Amino acid sequence: MGRILQLLNQLITIFNFSAYAIVAGTYFYLRKRTPSSTAHAYTYLLLAWIFIAATPLPGIIRNTFPPTMPHVHIWSLKLSMVACAFAFAWQYMFIGNFYVNPLLRYLFYLLGWLVTVPLNFLSILRNNFTIESSSAGIEVILSPFAFFTTLLAWSLLLGSFAITMIYVHRHLVDKRIKAKVIKVFSTYIVFWLLYLGESFGLLFSLMGGIGILLIRLILGIMAFITIIIWSGKRIFRDALSNLFCPFQ
């Protein structure tokens, strides 16, 4: 049973990488078909999802190593955290894009690059990470210091999404775009909450290996939900056709 769960863990990790990469590819498709005056928003989302897609890659590699090599597992998580830090920064650029006031816009830009990124890097400098075995493989547990700094970085991002949702609700005139933005931001909040709990051991002690596999599967599905809400089903299908059959 343990080997089956470990194989399932690897397959779900590969599925997540594929899902995140498809989302990034869809934003690349949207960026090419958007006027240059507004394409920068898709550029921010494209770069954010490129780094999000990079976060499962160290996990795919570490799943092939035995638990007798803890440094491989720990450095795998640290590399994922580095990719996550840059994903955060580009999502802050996307969030700031909604503000008309340049001071507010640059406040979010600075929050991403000068606060959240350093917090994520600060959390990986400490070496007292631990690993625990589960039925689905090896899980890396953050040290208390890394947990605190990571939680602070996550809280700032989630708070920024929530504040911007309120701002969009109050200031955006187009009701259709307003509803779409609020839905996408709500989905991002749930996505990052689940990602926080899954990646950094918060849910491991509560749910065990099988529960973590379920959360990882939900993350991949939610990635598709965010892009379908943002682009619409028809454009998403067109983007998939362009990605997998570019010469048709």
Image (cartoon, rainbow, N blue to C red):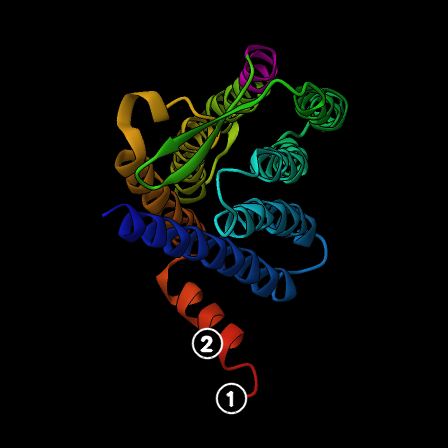
Q: Whole-percent x and y of residue 41?
A: 64, 46
Residue at image position (36%, 26%) is 204
Name the residue carrying label 1: 248
Is residue 122 depicted above or below 87 in this figure? above
Asked whether residue 207 is in view, the answer is yes
The residue that disc 2 covers is: 241
Closest to the observer, 141 or 22: 141
On the image, the x and y values in percent for residue 145 come to 60, 11
Looking at the rendering, the stretch of residues picked out in magenta corresponds to 144-152
SS of the residue under disc 2: helix
At 27% from the left edge and 34% from the top edge, which residue is drawn?
211
Q: Residue at x 64, y 29 (%)?
A: 99
The image position of residue 199, as x and y in percent, is 47, 32
- Indicate the position of residue 197 as horizontal and vertical percent values: 41, 26
Q: Is residue 99 above or below residue 34?
A: above
Identify the image quadrant of residue 55.
top right
